[in-house]
Image (cartoon, rainbow, N blue to C red):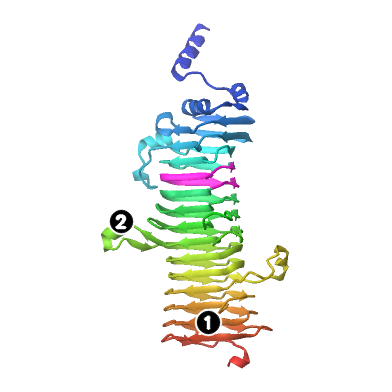
Amino acid sequence: MHRCFLILGVCGLVWGPMVRGADWEALGDGVKDCAEALEGALAKEGGVTLPRGVYRLTRTVTIDLEKGGFAALSGDGTARLVMEGEGPALHFRGTHDGTASPATVKDRVWERERTPSVTGIEIVGGNEAADGIEATGTMQLTLDRVVVRGCRHAVHLTERNRNVLIANCHFYHNRGIGVFYDNVNLHQSNIVGCHISYNGGGGVVSRGGNVRNLHIGTCDIEGNHAEEGEATANVLIDCTGGSTGEVAITGCTIQHSRNAPDSANIRVLGRGFDEGVGKRIGVAETMEGHVTITGNVMSDVQVNLHLVGARGVTVAGNTLWQGMMQDVLVEDCRSVVMTGNSMDRNPRYVVNETKDTERNGVVFRNCEGCIFADNAVSGVRGQEAAVDFVGCRRTQVRGNTVLDSPGVLLRIKDCRRCLISDNLLDAGKEEAKGLEVLGGTDNQMGSNWVPPKDR
C-alpha cells in the first residue's frame, strides 16, 4: 500500500497534476480561460479527450511536438473551443525539415512528433483575427470531423509540412480562407469529403510556396467569396512567387457566388518562380501545372474555370453552367486538354432569378498545343462567339457540339497551324453563323456541320 502511494507521488512530481474528466467538465463552462490547462495537458498527456462543454481560450494553445511528444485532441462533437485571442486556437509546431521520402525523416519525428491530430472538435472565433488550426513543421497532420466557423482562416498551413490529411470537416462562414496553403513547402496533402463554404477569402487557396500532390476530392465547396472583398475563388491556385503543381480536383460540387467581383469556381494562376529551375536552365520563371479537373459540378460565378499561364491541365467530364461572364476562360496557357464536358443553359434554373443574364461560353486566348474536343456547349448569350479561339497555335478543335446560341457558334481568329474538324454547329432558331475564320495562317479545316446557309 505504501509503495503504491509512493509511486503515485513520484508520478505527480514528475508529470505534475493531470486534468481529469471531471476537471474538464468544470473548465468547459464558457467562462474560465482553458488555454493554459489545455496546453499543459497536451504536453504532458499527449492524448486529450474533451467532454461536452465550451472551452474559452484567450491565447493560442501551442503544441510543441519536439518538447511534448505525440499529441492528439479529440471529442465526440460536443466540445467547443472559443478563440478570443488573436492567431490560431491550436498551433501544432514540429521540426520536420525533410520531404515525404523516408530517408529524410529524422528519428525524432517518428519517435515524438508524427501524426498530430484533431478529431471531433468545434472551433469558433471570438476575435476578428482568430484562426482555427495552424500547422508548422509537421509530419502527417490529420484533421477529422473538425468544425471551424466564425474565424479568420479555418486551417492555416505555414512554412513546411508533409503528408497532411483533412477529412470529413466543416469549414463554414469564416472571414478568411477555408484551407490556406500560405507560402508553404508542402507535398502530399489530401482534402476529402469536406464542406468548405462561405469563407470570404476563398475555399481552398494555395499562394506561392512549393506545393505538390494536392488532392481535393468529393467535397462541397461553395460561396467562398466576399461580395465586397478582393477577387478570389472557391479553389485558387496562385503560383506567383512560388510553384504549385500536381493537383487533382475530382468529384466536387463547386458553386457560387455570382455577385462577388471576378469570382471563379476554379482559378489557376500558373506563372511561378523556382530558383532550382533557374540554376539548371538559367530561367527561374515557370509555367506551373499538371492539374487534373475531373467529374466536378460548377456553376453560379463570374467565371467557372479560369486558367492563366498554366501548362499541362486536363479538364474532363465536368458539368458547368451559369458562368455570368464566361464558363471557361483560358489565357496564355499551353497543353490544356478539355474534353467530354457539358456547358448547357438548362431552363429549369430560372428559379435562380438570373433572368438569362449569364453569358456562359468558352474562350481560349493566346494558347498553344491545346485540345478542345467532344464537348457540348449550348445557350451562350452576349458573347462575340459561343466558342472562341483567339491567337492560338497548334491547337485542335474537334468533335464538339455547339448549339442554340446567337452570333457566331465557333470563331477561329488569328490562329496558326490549328486543326478544326468534325464539329456540329447548329444555332437552331437563333440567328447565328456556324463557323467564322478571321485571319491566321496554315490552319486546316475538316468536315464541320454548319447550317446550309453557311455552306
Q: Position of residue 205 (x, y in %)?
A: 49, 53
* Horizontal side of residue 322 vs 336, given as left or right: right
Task: Please state which amino acid type lies under the numbered disc 2.
Answer: Glu
Q: Quadrant of the C terminus?
A: bottom right
Rendered view: 198 above or below 361: above
- The residue that label 1 is drawn on is 411
Range covered by the magenta-colored residues: 147-175
Task: Please state which amino acid type lies under the numbered disc 1.
Answer: Arg
Q: Which of pointers 2 and 1 lies earlier in the amino acid sequence?
A: 2
- Residue 409 appears in the picture as rendered: yes
Q: Position of residue 332 (x, y in %)?
A: 43, 70
Quadrant assignment, res 454: bottom right
- Residue 70 appears in the picture as rendered: no
Q: Position of residue 259 (x, y in %)?
A: 61, 60
Numbered circle sitting on residue 283: none
Q: Nearer the viewer, mark 2 or mark 1?
A: 1
Residue in the foreground of this view, choosing between 106 and 325: 325
* Predominant SS of the magenta segment: strand
Crowd around label 1: few <14 · some 14–19 · many ≥20 (10 Å): many
Residue in the foreground of this view, choosing between 452 and 257: 257
Say if the magenta span includes residue 109.
no
Quadrant assignment, res 386: bottom right
Dot 1: element: strand
Q: Which residue is painted at 71% across and 70% down in the image? A: 347
Q: Which residue is painted at 64% across and 71% down in the image? A: 344
- The residue that label 2 is drawn on is 275
Inter-mark Cα distance, 2 to 1: 40 Å
